[in-house]
Image (cartoon, rainbow, N blue to C red):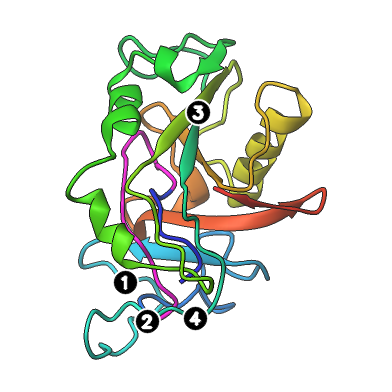
Amino acid sequence: MRFRIPLIALGGAIAVAACGKDDVTQPSDAAPAPDFASVGWGVHVMPARGLLPAGIELAPKARGTGIQYHGGPILVTPKVSAIYWGTSRIYNNGPTPGAKGAGSADGSIVGYFLGHYAPSAYFNINNTYTNSSGQRVANSVAYTQFWADNANPGSKPSDAAIRAEVTKAFTSGNMTFDASTVYLVFTGSGVNLGGGFGTQYCAYHGHFSWNGNDVKY
């Protein structure tokens, strides 16, 4: 599996799961949407319940857990950062547009969840996984930083636009890059991140290269 951490949050909802390489195939070039269907870097999609888009097929069940380790990198000390993308406050007690700070200063329900998700008995399931060096995934998630970008994402920002928003967080100096961090993007209601939220998928996560760094989002 590529990494086992909270997924990107779409349309203001949080999804926490793992998509192993044997769980869901990546979108094929034949898939009409979302717009990342034909890109070459890795994206894992969690199809919406009962709605499997064209070009995406569930792999046959493997024996045991069905989650197989393929030798790729694992985040043994996972961290998360939140990007709030909108011209108004998205959640009650959440960051106002233009604000940034440590995760502990995020007073929204999302901030509370990210700050209290682990250690927990549920997240400790991840401790059963090791990397190629035998290191186990820690029963912890550090919510390190947030940034509320005072910008309008539009009604249906493409995946390329989402990646550009994450890159903007770095180039603007509002966030720092960390290889063990997953950057979660949140928007207000009515915004369809990637173009297929709710109709084709409930969430997706991926990664891309920026200045030679592997960015997980």
Q: Is residue 41 above or below residue 54?
A: above
Please report contact status of discs 2 and 1: CB closer than 8 Å, yes or no. yes
User: Could you say where residue 2 lies in the image, as x and y percent from the top left?
Assistant: 51, 67
User: Could you say where residue 16 lies in the image, as x and y percent from the top left?
Assistant: 31, 50
What type is the residue that disc 2 sits on?
Glu
Q: Secondary structure at mark 3?
A: strand
What residue is drawn where x is 35% and y is 33%?
12
Pointer 1: what residue? 52
Numbered tag placed on residue 57 in the rendering:
2
Toward the viewer: 82 or 9?
A: 82
The magenta stretch spans residue 19 = yes
Cα distance between the residues tagged 4 and 3: 29 Å
What residue is drawn where x is 45% and y is 22%?
103
The quarter in which the N terminus is drawn is bottom left
Residues packed near mark 3 inside 10 Å, few (<14), some (14 to 19) or many (20 plus): some
Q: Is residue 88 above or below residue 103?
A: above
Pointer 4: what residue? 70
Magenta-drawn segment: 8-22
Q: Nearer the viewer, mark 1 or mark 3?
A: 3
Left or right of 189: which side holds 21? right
Q: Is residue 165 above or below residue 78?
A: above
Ranked by sequence position, the earlier of labels 2 and 4 is: 2
Q: Is residue 112 above or below residue 210?
A: above
Cα distance between the residues tagged 1 and 3: 34 Å
Residues packed near mark 4 inside 10 Å, few (<14), some (14 to 19) or many (20 plus): few
User: Could you say where residue 89 lies in the image, as x and y percent from the top left?
Assistant: 42, 13
What type is the residue that disc 4 sits on?
His
